[in-house]
Amino acid sequence: MPHPVREAVEALGPWLSETRRKIHMNPELGFHEFETSRLVSESLEGWGIEVRNGLAKTGVVGLFRTGRPGPTIGIRADMDALSVQEENNVPYKSRSDGKMHACGHDAHTTMLLGTARVLAENPPLLDGVGGNVKFIFQPAEEGLAGGRAIVEEGALDDPRVDLVLAGHVFPALPVGTIGTHTGPMMASGDKFFVTLRGRSSHAAYPHHSRDPILTAGHIITALQGVVGRNVNPFDAAVVSVTQMEAGVALNVIPEEVHLRGTIRTISPEVREMVKGRVEETIRGVAAAFGVEAEIEMLTGYPSLSNHAGATALIEKAGREMLGEENVLPAPLGMGSEDFAYMVQKCPGAMFRLGIRNEERGIVHGLHSNRFDLDEDALPLGVSVFVQAVRAYLTDPQTFDSAAPARS
Ligand code: NI
């Protein structure tokens, strides 16, 4: 028997890929998603959905009310592109030089629009259930914490969101599958900026110098001991020095070296400990060489930990829409994701949506200038969201009770 959700999604026809391509061709960077935001807001209004514009500058929140009492489920998509020059030769290639939807946020925006459209145009799908569905289109996921900004501006309030879901396209998983995981799935991401200030001299007279380059070499090596000798091997952490700038002439020991890098951790305790040890290591090694160290730590996104109830909801919808065998364990990673700010406020979970298709050459990683996705994933993502909404509004207690209480 055809499933009513599958039928409703199929009825959208090519509209999902057309929408995704429209957004793909016009990528906009964080907090500058003006056209995308307008497309989202006008589409939602066209389907009779209540809209709040201008949250966190370009964010849009749509609210679909069943008109009957009940809880509110939120679904979040991010809308921003990256500063990447697209190298794919496809008809829908980015028309904006140096900007590209290389993280699939065009697909996230499209799938959330698709979910809104299916629910708005097919009232029987929510027959007999009460509550609301909130569609949260956030700006600036890529490094600028648009997710935090939109939460601060009330995206999860009025009505309060009881449970929030999100999906992220994932090139390691084949199209037709999703990946789910309860508990920690992605890392926190903090940044450090270091200036080592020594004393410059002629390269042939190093005893007149306080050499910041030699110091930097020892610091980079010593920093690898921070994780190796402080973090329990069963906890995950990464310290990477990723940028180094120094020197202007071959025969001069310079006065300054600049180092930059990133710290990734899962648990908040390990996060604080590693940040502290990184700072102490840099200061201690610099002092040993008589070099002054100026250190700036920038706190980035928290780690993302999926709630049990929200994950169970995604898994149930995934099994029903894609088949038992296509709900896989999500690969864990030390990347970070600002959906974590929403999950700190409200039980929630993110799943990974398979988009890989080797036959079509769709194998490139997120943020690659050759990244692309199999658009067959779009209707699948929509059906998982729609089915999750139905399952939650039908029986919220089952999923709420499996989730830890809101902090
Ligand atoms: Ni992304």
Image (cartoon, grey):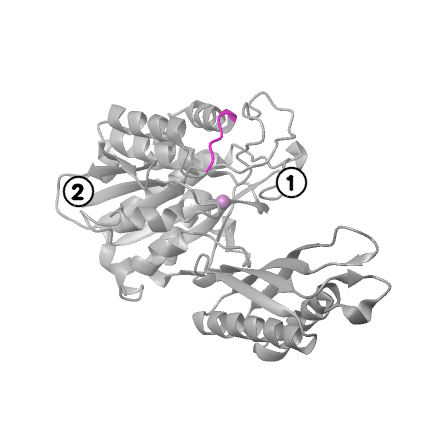
Kindly tell me whether mark 1's CB lies below 8 Å from ligand 1.
no
Report whether residue 6 is seen.
yes
Residue at figure coordinates x 22%, y 48% from the top left: 72
Report whether residue 187 is seen.
no
Identify which amino acid the numbered label 2 is placed on: Gly
Residue at figure coordinates x 26%, y 47% from the top left: 153
Q: In which quarter of the image is the C terminus?
A: bottom left
Q: Position of residue 284 (x, y in %)?
A: 62, 77
Q: In which quarter of the image is residue 112?
A: top left
Q: Which of 2 and 210 is in front in this view?
A: 210
Q: Do the residues labelled 1 and 2 touch (CB within 8 Å)?
A: no
Q: Is mark 2 on a helix, strand or loop?
A: loop
| Above/below status of 67 relative to 173 | above
Asked if the magenta segment contains residue 28, the reply would be yes
Q: Which of 158 and 142 is in front in this view?
A: 142
**Mark 1 → mark 2, Cα distance in angstroms:** 43 Å
Q: Is mark 1 on a helix, strand or loop?
A: loop
Q: Where is residue 213 in the image (x, y as percent from the top left)?
A: 73, 63
Pointer 2 residue: 128
Residue at figure coordinates x 68%, y 78% from the top left: 288
- The tag on residue 363 is 1
Left or right side of 341 for 156:
left
> What secondary structure is the magenta-colored segment mainly?
loop
Asked if the magenta segment contains residue 366, the reply would be no
Left or right side of 361 for 24:
left
Q: Which of 102 and 75 is in front in this view?
A: 102
| Above/below status of 215 relative to 59 | below
Please tell me how crowded label 1 is: few (under 14), some (14-19), or many (20+) other residues with Cα within 10 Å.
many
The mark that comes first in sequence, 1 or 2, is 2
| Above/below status of 283 relative to 324 | below
Per the rendered image, the range of residues in magenta is 25-29
